[in-house]
Amino acid sequence: MTEKMLDRPALFSRPAPILIFIIIAVVVDQVVKIAVDRYLPLHEAVPVIPMLALYRTYNLGVAFSMLSGMDGWFIVGMRLVIVAFVLWLWHRTSKDRWIAHIGFALIIAGALGNLIDRFLYGHVIDYILFHTESWSFAVFNLADSFITVGAGCVILDELLQPKKMES
């Protein structure tokens, strides 16, 4: 590899690719939510495979229905603060830590996808349900999955990144 190639930041460390990735992720999230809202019955499980069903419901809280009793504008403000914080982290993270940068992009895309729902509908459209006969996980959506996988990427990057020795 040439020295010039080694100095070049990773794909998801550059603004244009990460912005395109975020836009595509948000568009996919919104298209799926529109289809779910239009075609999936409200509060009626549609089995997909054992332990997985589609179940349209409206979430007044944040990811996985947390904080559902809080005021809607508080939740909007909290999401905007999270997006700003993740952008700040992205700018402070070394350009070679591409796994963290993908994680940041996923977190931002998920937060924006759910924020759009909150502005358009006053709630977030959730539709994925993992369950057994005696247990069920919170109903969630693709944007929530983006946030969760993104956080996992950031944690994974932190675990894999060699620690620098303090001098």
Image: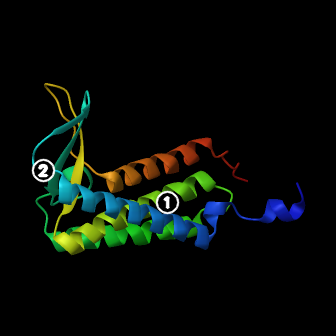
Q: Nearer the viewer, residue 71 or 16?
A: 16
**With 3 as the anchor, is 120 left or right in this view?**
left
Label 1 close to label 2 by CB (< 8 Å) = no
**With 147 as the anchor, is 77 left or right in this view?**
left
Name the N-terminal-most of marks 1 and 2: 2
Image location of residue 91, percent across then percent down: 57, 69
Displayed quadrant of residue 159: top right
- The residue labelled by disc 2 is 41
Displayed quadrant of residue 115: bottom left
Residue located at (15% from left, 52% from top) = 57
Which image quarter is the N terminus in?
bottom right
Image location of residue 141, percent across then percent down: 29, 51
Image location of residue 167, percent across then percent down: 73, 53
Q: Residue type at mark 2?
A: Pro
Residue located at (36% from left, 49% from top) = 145
**Does any portion of residue 161 appear in the rendered image?**
yes
- Say above or below: 152 vs 136: below
Image location of residue 119, percent across then percent down: 23, 74
**With 19 as the anchor, is 136 left or right in this view?**
left
Q: Residue type at mark 1?
A: Phe
Q: Colour mode? A: rainbow
- The residue labelled by disc 1 is 104
